[in-house]
Image (tube, rainbow, N blue to C red):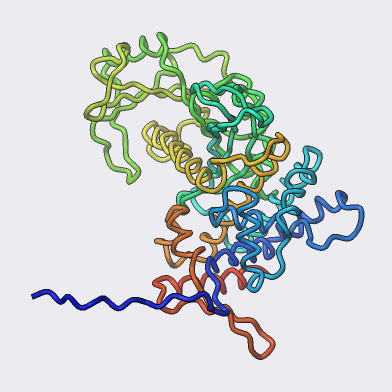
Amino acid sequence: MKSIAAVSRVKVSADGHGVVSHAGMGMLRELAELSGLSAGVTAALADTYRGPWIYPPGAVFADLAAAVADGATCIDGVGQSCGDREHVFGPAASTTTMWRLVDERIDAAHLPAIRAARSDARAAAWAAGAAPAGDGWLHIDMDATITIDHSDNKQNAAATWKKTYGHHPLLAFLDRPEVAGGEALAGLLRAGNAGSNTAADHITVLGRALESLPAAYRPDPDDPAAQKILVRSDSAGATHKFATECRRQGVGFSFGFAVDARVRDAVDTLNLADAWYPAIDSGGGIRDGAWIAEATGLVDLSGWPAGTRLILRKERPHPGAQLNFTDADGMRVTAFITDTPNGVIDGQLAGLELRHRQHARVEDRIREAKATGLRNLPCHGFDANNAWLEIILAATDLVAWATLIGFTEHPDLATCEIDTFRYRVLHVAARITKGARQIRLRIDATWRWAAAITAAWHRLRDAFP
């Protein structure tokens, strides 16, 4: 028999004291100070002030980046998020001051100094434990995306090739498979009608991406022992000028290649010669229903840098996929070019193809960036939206460094996507207490990840000298 007794209700009142929500945002805010990002931005923007400032511009920039990582999508939202937590993180600038920083102070003349400050902060973070470890290669993934704008009063917003309206930024991420969002090396905000395969834009972003790396991790074409870097992109990056620039900068390339009539003829030749080899999966095992072959000698590649190789892949399409009329024998054919010679990557052709296929992770990086402020460009001016883009990239980096340094013993938190990371870490509730001339942030003991968050916070503080 069911009880019909009234369910007791929790009494709700607005008289709580010493309680703070979204307390984890303070971790990112403190990381900006520890890594030197705040100080670097302050030095970069010092000449934009006529007199002393009340709030250092680097602190305002750090507030913006931390709040964007926490989920703020516009500057007004940042002001509210920071202003509500002054009793935890200290005084915050007004929304007007934040607008002025983005709309006036970070202009085209000061953006290079902001990027240099981010590069110095990355060097400090890598020295503190966030440096990549692996086979000695760094993989830079480049791709463009569309930021839709439903308004026609934003500078350089235009019709895009997808029949939408907005901007078309080109981004470069350092592939860090151990974290969800990667590291955001560089970005170029472009008009909505910018081309996907504009070589000049790819060259610009590559230069910025290399400059954003710590000095010890930059390539040197004259030093065979220098850091090995590979740039990956889809077929939009496969231009002769961009490949030549990669060679000049001392970095390798792996670009998608259009499957045209020459490639289809090569496929027919390889089929007749039975020259296909099994592809491999990420674990090194044979990938069922996929084969690879080299077609370097079957297609004229004389216009590309010396040593360029053409590698093809054919596979059975997944159920329900629609084939093109040019697909041979019911197989989906794709191609890419690379200048990596034999014997460099384990697995030979299969290893090269697997490495190129992992470029697809950049789609996850862009999706994460769009969930961290890139979905909306809040300003009318193009320079102001450029500044907003740098704030988004800084926010992405802060999250990556926090997970790489602080949550090494908790892979479930290090690899979770930004929405989950916000729920578990950034949005955690805590209580503020004062005593013995100290302010203590007491994270809710009943929260499942309370101990991990506390340990990560202390680990971040210990990592920086």
- On screen, residue 326 versus residue 252, left or right, reads left
In the rendered image, is residue 219 in sight? no
* As drawn, 331 above or below 286: above
Q: Image point 44% across, 67% down: which residue?
A: 409
Q: Is residue 371 left or right of residue 37?
A: left
Where residue 134 appears, as percent x and y from the top left, is 49, 51
Q: Nearer the viewer, residue 389 or 328?
A: 389
Left or right: residue 31 compared with residue 23: right
Query: In which quarter of the view is residue 410 placed?
Result: bottom left
Image label count: 0
The residue closer to the viewer here, 134 or 60, is 60
Tell which of 175 and 164 is nearer to you.
164
**Viewer-side residue, 386 vs 229:** 386
Residue at the farthest right position: 50
The answer to whether residue 128 shows anywhere in this view is yes
Q: Residue at x 38, y 23 (%)?
A: 334
Quadrant in which the N terminus is drawn:
bottom left
Residue 203 coordinates in the image, percent (x, y): 65, 29
Query: Can you say whether 44 is above or below 222 in the image?
Result: below
Residue at image coords 55%, 26%: 165
Residue 212: percent from left, percent from top: 67, 45
Q: Residue furthest bottom?
A: 436
Percent x, y of residue 306: 57, 21
Q: Is residue 426 above or below residue 400?
A: below
